[in-house]
Amino acid sequence: MMSVAYSVDVRRIDEFSAADLYDMLKLRVDVFVVEQHCAYPELDGNDKDCLHLRLLQDRELLACARLWRPTPAHHPRIGRVAVSPDHRGKRLGEALMREAISEVEKRHPGEPIEISAQSHLQKFYGSLGFEVISEEYLEDGIPHVDMLRRV
């Protein structure tokens, strides 16, 4: 596997240009709705409350993730982890998660990090320090487990 040079961009949704917002939302719909054959509300009303981390090469979007701040019910969370199909096989999923973990740790030191992971990705997330903390459940017709990365 080859790796790719990239820059990291983290911002709130209202800080995106229309073109950059379109690119990010299109990538998420392409991956989570079209590629995974899953009709569900990708635009779920939560993007305004999160930070959005993107990996870019020049101005091209390679990958993105959504970062939730902690709430009374949850530790900080990472979600909507997506790598462009045109850039898979270049270790970008791992790079994206490492950047997301670093950003969450910088903003919320001493906090564990939660994810809701598709079940078939348990080994991948486990390699990044996440442990399964729930039974398997269906989310939008896809098997998932909750995972936690302890401090």
Image: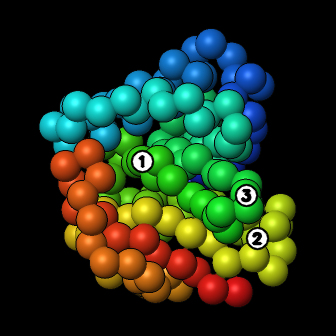
* Residue 33 or residue 127, whichever sits in front: 33
Residue 69 in the image: state x and y as whole percent.
73, 55
* Viewport quadrant of the C terminus: bottom right
Judged from the image, the secondary structure of the residue bearing numbered disc 3 is loop
* Residue 115 or residue 30, whichever sits in front: 115
Residue 16 against residue 106 in the figure, above or below: above
Image quadrant where residue 113 sits:
bottom right
Q: Which mark is residue 82?
A: 1
Q: Residues within 10 Å of mark 3 (few under 14, many from 20)?
A: few
Question: If you read the primary sequence from the N terminus, does the residue marked by circle 1 or circle 2 appear first?
Answer: 1
Q: Which mark is residue 149?
A: none
Q: Residues within 10 Å of mark 2 (few under 14, many from 20)?
A: some
Residue 61 against residue 78 in the figure, above or below: above
Cα separation between marks 2 and 3: 15 Å
Q: Which amino acid type is marked by label 2?
A: Glu
Cα separation between marks 1 and 2: 20 Å
Cα separation between marks 1 and 3: 24 Å
Q: Which amino acid type is marked by label 1?
A: Ala
Find disc 2 in the rendering and name its residue: 105
Q: Residue at x 48, y 43 (%)?
A: 62
Q: Which mark is residue 71?
A: 3
Residue 103 vs residue 45: left or right?
Answer: right
Q: Residue at x 44, y 82 (%)?
A: 133
